[in-house]
Every structure is written in C-alpha cells, then in structure tokens.
Amino acid sequence: MDNYLLISLILLPALAAIMVAFVPRQRLFEIRAISGIVAFALFVLSAYSFINYDNEVGGYQFTRDYAWLDALGIQLSMGIDGISTTMVLLTGIVSFTAVLISWNIEHRAKDFFVLFLLLVAGVYGVFVSLDLFFFFFFYELAVLPMYLLIGVWGSSSDFVTFIRNKEYGALKLMLYLVAGSILVWVALLAVYVEGDMNSFSLLKLQDAEFSEDFQRLYFPMFMVGFGVLAGLWPFHTWSPDGHVAAPTSVSMLHAGVLMKLGAYGIIRIGVDLLPQGAEYWMPLLMILGTINVVYGAVSALSQTDLKYVIGYSSVSHMGYVFMGLATLNATGMGGAVLQMFSHGIMTALFFALVGVIYDRSHVRDIGILEGLAKRMGWTASFFAIAGLASLGLPGLSGFVAEVLVFIGTFKDYPIFGVLGIIGAAITAVYILRLLGKVFFGPISEDWKTLPDASNVEKFSAGILVLFLLVVGLYPKPWMDLINTGLSPLIERVAGL
C-alpha cells in the first residue's frame, strides 16, 4: 500500500471527478455519495501518511517515480517529508468537511463536484510532487477551477450586486493568481536551465550550484509569485473579495488549503533551492509579513460583512506564516508551518459557520445580526472556539503556532515581534466584538425562528474543532514531523 499511497491521493479525486461526470445530473444522491466516499477515503489515507511517517528515518518517504518525458528529465516523482505530510493531513481534513458542507448544493451539483474534486487532486499533487514540472502542473490544476467555482456558484449578501460581485471576485482572483504563476514559471525554467542537469527533479537540483547573483535575482520571483496565492501584502486584495464571492465549501478550501500552497512553494522551492537568495530577501518578507498581520487585523476590525471579517483575518494570520518563514531559524519556521495547519483548520471552521448563518438568515451584516446564540447554540459554540483559536487562547492550536513565531522573530527582529503582538491584540478586539454583537445580547425578532446547524454541519464543524483542541493541547506529533522536515532546510541555510 505504501508504494501507491501518494499516487492514490491524486488519482482518487481525479477518477471520482470522471465518475461524477458520467452520472446523470438528476441523480443527486449518487453524485454526493461518490464525492463524500472519496473525500472520506482521502481523509483516511492522509491520516495514514501522517501516522506512519517515520521521524527516525526522516527525509522523503512513500516515494514513487513514474517516467514521463525522459528527454527533458521530467518524471512524476512523489514523496513527502515532515512538512508536506502535515499539509497532506490538512488537505484531507478540510476536503472531507467541505464536501459535507456542500451536501445541500442542488444548482448544477454535478458540475460543482467535478470541479471541486479536480481542485483537490491538484492540491494533493502539489504537496507530494518532487518534480518541479509536475509541481507547477498540479499548482495550476488547483488554482484554475476556482474561477468557475466562484463565478457560477458564488453569492453575495446584496441581491442587487449578486452577479457583479461574484464575477468580479472570480475574475480578480484569477488575474492575480495567473500573474503570480507567470513569475513562478519563469523562475522554474531559469532554475532548470541554470541547474544544467537536464532534470526538473527537486532532489537533483538541490545539488546544483547556483551563483549568489542568480539566487538573489530569482528568489524574489518565487517569493512574490507564490506569495500572491498566500495573500502577501500588497498582492492580497484578491483574497477577501474571492472569499466573499465564493460558496461556503470553496471558501473553506480556498482559505484553509489553497493559500497554504503559496507558503509551501516558498519553503519547498524558494528556500530549499535558493538559500542564499532567501537569506538576502527574507528581511523584506519580514516587513511585508508584519504589514500583513497589522493591516489585516485593522481591516478586519473595520468590516461589517462576516465574510469580509474572516477574509481579512486570513490575510492577517497568513502574515504570521511569512514572519515565521522570514526568521530562517528552526523555532520561527516551525511555528510558521504549524500556523499553516492551525489557520487552515480554524479558517475552514469560520467559513463553514458563516455559511450556516447565511443559509438560515440570508444576511451577513454584523449590524443586523444579534443574539443568535439563543437560537443557534451549536453554531455559536463552534464559532466561539474558532474565534478563541484565532486570538491565540492557550489550549488551542493558534496559541502554540503564534508563540513559536514570536519567539523566532524576537531572536533577530524584536521590533517586528512587538508589532506582531500588537496585531494579535487587535485580533482579540475584533473577534470579541464580533462574538458579542452577533451571538450574545438580546435577540432580534427577525431571528427568533432561525434553526441551528444540521447534524451534518455539526459533524463537520466538530471534526475541525477536534483538531484545534488536539493540536493546542498536544502539539508534539505535529512539531516532531515539522522539525524533521525543516532540519535539512535549516542546515542548508546555516551552512551558507
């Protein structure tokens, strides 16, 4: 099984998409059942890879190579280390819960699940690829379905601007991400040619001797190109608009997993292949990441739409990822990777619950919603846990990740560490204000008949809450894996 584990993660959703495409669109149950069963299987396989990764051995495991185009040195080469194993688990969790949240979609459900499953296949492909050509191929496969998923199934709280908003959000997202992809592709081709090994293999290119000038020239192309997808300021503006326009499950996958592809690309390709370029440009990433944190938090504080609050909150929390990566030390980078996992779970939970509220009330305006906890107790409880994880309450996953990022940052950038803590304080303000206004206090007459989350939605949210608690209370398995994956990177940077 181990030899075919990683290819299964790619083929299962791809084959499921093909199966769904041949199911008559009237047979909604079969369409949903295929998608749900495959999503659960992916979750199980992802958990299997996480549990069975051997920390003592380290390196890339579950490896498998398939020849494709030998003349150019391109092959489907797969393997996962401690970092990518963590991201594979994140993908399995968010994909499964997002499919459950999508269960009530009826408008062109067949087309929706085909695109959704292709997107999931692309995400898995990125995290398991050890060949730069296929890394980019799967990267694009993960990004491109977003345009249709938002443009066709998107929504808005304002019916008058419904069509414009979702099309605007989808087009803006696509233009930004394609622009970032161009930078990445140019830099990948430059690495392939300069490496002079007639190979796109990541493992072979690690041994290539890239000049310092080359690394300083092309690392920022990876940093910005991948950073666009990760919401790096000032290239972040597509993200809140995309979140607001996207349907609930797509927002979950978008913020929970897709934004992590960008940060993962910076680690896996930028830092790994061009460590001297990383060392030269990381002070700039620290500055931009700190702006992400403070600007995103202040912007979230000023929003009145629930989805915009969570959208800008995602921009802010991804700033902690950039700050951690920019430290280039084991503590900060370990915190950054754990923050990727923690934020992925937390923001998926946020968007799932916002979707529950909007489905019942057809409103996302914080000024109108109030006292919902009296009618939606489960939703309020889950939202409170997500909010407390967001503001870094001890015992939840956000606290562990942010503490590691702050410690790593204070080692070399104490001023930015202070600014990051200020951003966390602002986060507490807008989260507590949001909880107080929307869920607590007197309930409006308009909301006294609202039903709570369904059993399926409770189950989906419960899974996400479970991981927030487990990582917060016992982060050791995650940090052991992450540190195993980071050790070779830290050694490469330290050896400069």
Image (spheres, grey):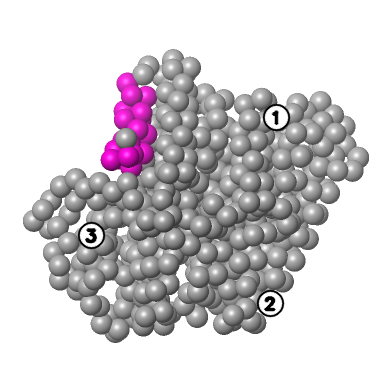
Disc 2 or disc 1, which is closer to the eye? 2
**Residue at left offset 31%, top offset 30%:** 15
CA separation, marks 2 and 1? Answer: 39 Å
- Which quarter of the image is occupied by the N terminus? top left
Give the distance between the C-alpha atoms of the residues marked 3 and 1, in whole angstroms. Answer: 47 Å
Q: Which residues are magenta?
A: 2-22
Which residue is at 41% across, 40% downward? 120
Residue 19 belongs to magenta span? yes
Label 2 belongs to which residue? 418
The residue singled out by tag 3 in the image is 201
Name the amino acid, label 1. Ala
- Residue at 70%, 36% (x, y): give it: 357
Q: Is residue 7 left or right of residue 348?
A: left
- From this viewpoint, which residue is outermost toward the left? 71
Is residue 196 toward the left or the right of residue 38 in the image? Answer: left
Q: Secondary structure at mark 2?
A: helix
Q: Earlier in the sequence, mark 2 or mark 1?
A: 2
Where residue 175 sits in the image (x, y, percent)?
Answer: 41, 56
| Side of 18 where 53 appears, left or right | right
Q: Specify the quadrant that holds the C terminus.
A: bottom left
Q: Residues within 10 Å of mark 3 (few under 14, many from 20)?
A: many
The residue that mark 1 highlights is 453
**Residue kind at label 3, given as amino acid type:** Ser
